[in-house]
Image (spheres, grey):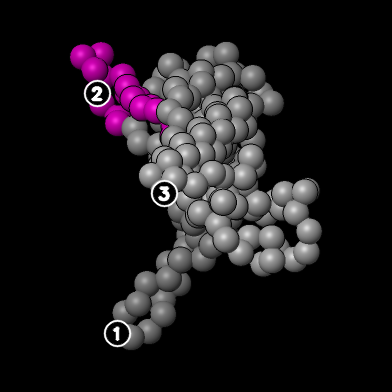
Amino acid sequence: MTILNRNERGTEKESCDLTIEVSGEGVIAAAPDRTIITLGVVTEGKEVAPVQRENAAAIRAIIEALTELGVPRSNVQTKSYSIDPQYDYEDGKQVFRGYKATHLLQISLDGVEHAGTVLDTATAHGANLISEVAFASSEAEKHQEEALAQAVRRAQQKAASIAASLGVSLSAVPCKVQEIGTEGEPVRFKTMMAASDATLIEPGQLTFKAAVRLWYLFA
């Protein structure tokens, strides 16, 4: 975004001719409080109808088991469903092998402590594909704003230090402010087997980043 000082006149170029340009970055770390798991069932066979039935039965068993576990039905939804023909290649020729049905569910959980239990329950009832385990924060917008405020403060501090070193004074507010696009670090997690053979998930922390560039008039 670009913001011009309301006291300036003329074009953006004219209002920022003699400036000190600085940048700042803000980084906020926060513990996740939500888990999003994507898992499902893959079935294969010669005929499409039995493949569909087997897949549907496994998905029903998974959903029922998760409901008994306490996961609200509204927190489980289909993310994708497909049936694809499968082929082998023999002597350079395409040979039909059968069909593959893939049904992926997206499961949303409040908190992170039950992720391993959900994975174990799903796999015990037919899930044979774990696509993703991701973590999020219910206060993501707040943390992103905190990172942005931190980035602005750091840029302001840089500008003040430069101005003091040069013996000049800065305008009260920047003549231009630009937010720089940044990407947060991916959430990393580890899966481990405990003595009880239960899957343990270590969610780590979420990282929220922001960066800005400021232009100050000086005299």
Quadrant assignment, res 30: top left
Q: Residue at x 64, y 35 (%)?
A: 77
- Numbered label attached to residue 91: 1
Q: Which residue is mark 2?
A: 193
* Residue drawn at the location 48% of the way across and 50% of the way down: 22
Is disc 3 in contact with disc 2, using a CB cutoff of under 8 Å? no
Side (left or right) of 52 relative to 200: right
Which residue is denoted by mark 3 in the rendering? Answer: 166
Q: Nearer the viewer, residue 27 or 205?
A: 27
Q: Secondary structure at mark 1?
A: loop
Going by the numbered disc 3, the residue's amino acid type is: Leu
Q: Nearer the viewer, residue 201 or 143?
A: 143
Tell which of 144 and 72 is nearer to you.
144
First in residue order: circle 2 vs circle 1: 1
Which of disc 2 and disc 3 is earlier in sequence? Answer: 3
Which is more foreground, mark 3 or mark 1? 3
Give the magenta part as a residue range. Answer: 190-209
Residues at marks 3 and 2, CA–CA distance in whole angstroms = 60 Å
Amino acid under disc 1: Asp
